[in-house]
Image: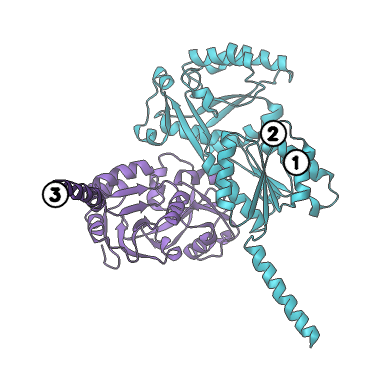
Chain colours: A cyan, B purple
Amino acid sequence: MRCKQLLLTLGWLLIGMQVAFAAGANQNVLFLRKEGKGFDDVFSGMKKELQGKYTVTDFAVEKATSCLEIQEKFISGHPDLIVLMDNKPLDCALKYNLAQTSDSKRMRGVALMGLNLKAILKGNAFISGIAFESPAYTLLIQYRYVVKKPLKHVLAFYRKSLFQETMAAATKQLLTEGVQLEAVNVEAEGVSKDAVAHFVSENLKKYATQTDRYDVVWVLLDSGILTQSLFQEVWLPVARSSKIPFVTGAEELVMPELDFATFAVTPNFSDLANQAVQQVESILVDHVSPKDLGVEELISVNKILNLNRAHALELPLNESSLKDIKIVP
Amino acid sequence: MLRHLVFIIAVLWMGLAMPMLHGLAAAKPQVSIYYPSVLSARERQDVLKTGLAGYDVTVFAKFRDFSEDLKSKETPIVVAPASFQKAHPEYTPVLGFSGHEGRKFKYALLALSEKWNKGNLEEGKIGLVEEVDREQLKGLVSSLLKVNCKFVKTVSKPEDLFPLLVFKTTDFIMISPDNYELLKEKFTAKVYRVTESEAVDNPTVFVRKGSSVDEAIQALKGLPSGVLGPLGFTSIGPIGVAP
């Protein structure tokens, strides 16, 4: 009789636990984030959606914050999931997971707003993510809609050692829209800084002014090919003199005072927050493994058009497309 | 003395009555609108401002903002997808918009490769524009497609659906035929039409129970084709009455 009662109590307890677990009750989500405009926007967007369902705590990671301090938060806070905003907390989480002896001790997380996440998290079983770089596909398809001109051939300079997979993916994605990407490896004569700088200096003008061959130049955001000196001495003069529009993924590069790029797309922070919340809930509620989620591409972007450059290049604009884009100046 | 008294009464009257009169003048009810559309919220707001002059009309670009706004106040009139009703029993559907296909439409389910088809629909990830809270999402999609959907992802606007497919974030996207037609101008990738959803009502006008908004409903009912056309509709009429 007593045994029967015990079993019944246990059964109810188990059901209660399952219900609480399914509802996400008492699950802790710890944010480790850099402070700053975009980071605050994404954090507050995610917090708004998660609070009430989960216990949300956050820790601001500053320049001086050590990995030990970050890892201490994992140990003391027992989070069910960590949200890693920027490369530094991600790096510390990866080191922490590596040092653990069993999977149950490893942190599950979602990484965002860090650079090169696809490469860093490739095959990672515990941390999924969202790439922060605006995809070439989105940039170019949005550009094509704004500018009423056929878009068939795109030129891009890139470093093969770091961006081979990015280029392969972009090539495939753009082909679905009939756009061909011609990616020029700037490490063709060597991977050293000097070799790259030499290649860019010697070749950018030669390629990026061939109006019969290219419709647009995609400027990949890579500090290795956009060094300050290369930008000032090579990229800027070539972009200003070329009849081919330059497009990119940074708002600064499309500002009229710079007189460089014609069109840019940048991450839409409010939608990025929602995309990240969906990953958080996939892991915590649907029990999808971070490995299966992988690193998703950024989906939603803001569009910015430099009207001065568009006029200088005599680009015909699609009036109806201009309603939901930021036009500078 | 009497003159002073009259003056004081007059001032008091103005102080009390004027705001009341002002309140009466500004008593036109608020209309909150959200439904997934390729047309920007600003464009739709501009069009509706001409059709509903004097009303406090807000067109929301994103479901989340619309949903937050509804939580913070008792909006008397709402225009929303038909799915709104299940989560908001405090509202009653009164008017329905009609498009070129009539009062109802069917979502198209598209895939980028024939690898994803009706046979493996349950295994695939489905993307759609947000129109209900996440807790109700799988239920909504499952009932519309008559399958048990396991993975559903949302975006805030129709133009973000095609990137979901191209980046393989989802295997299918669910899109209304009018939004698909408009997006074909931007996205030219070859897609496969896997299936269609059950028929669903076009955006519907809901009234919060207990609100007296007859005048506003008449104004909505009388929206001219010059307003309905740019919004993608052909007519608007009472629920339960054929257009």
Answer whether labels 3 and 1 touch (C-beta < 8 Å): no
Label at residue A22: none
Q: Is residue A299 above or below residue A161?
A: below
User: Neighbour class for label 3 at 10 Å: few (<14), some, many (≥20)?
Assistant: few
User: Can residue B169 be seen in the rendering of this structure?
Assistant: no
Residue B201 drawn at (x, y percent): 37, 61
Task: Say if labels 3 and 1 share a chain.
Answer: no
Label 2 marks a residue whose chain is: A
Q: Residue extending furthest front? A: B1
Residue wearing tag 3: B2
Q: What residue type is disc 1 on?
A: Ile
Residue wearing tag 1: A70
Q: Dot 1 lies on which element?
A: helix
Task: Say if labels 3 and 2 share a chain.
Answer: no
Task: Say if labels 1 and 2 share a chain.
Answer: yes
Q: Residue at x 66, y 45 (%)?
A: A58
What is the distance, in whole Å, between disc 1 and disc 2 at their CAs?
10 Å
Quadrant into which the C terminus of chain B falls: bottom left
Q: Residue at x 56, y 34 (%)?
A: A37
Residue wearing tag 2: A62
Residue B59 drawn at (x, y percent): 36, 47
User: Can residue B150 be seen in the rendering of this structure?
Assistant: yes
What is the distance, in whole Å, between disc 3 and disc 2 at their CAs?
73 Å
Q: What residue type is disc 3 on?
A: Leu
Q: Dot 2 lies on which element?
A: loop
Q: Residue at x 48, y 50 (%)?
A: B64
Q: Is residue A324 above or below residue A161?
A: below
Q: Dot 3 lies on which element?
A: helix
Point out the frontmost of discs 3 and 2. Answer: 3
Label 3 marks a residue whose chain is: B
Q: Is residue B131 left or right of residue B119?
A: left
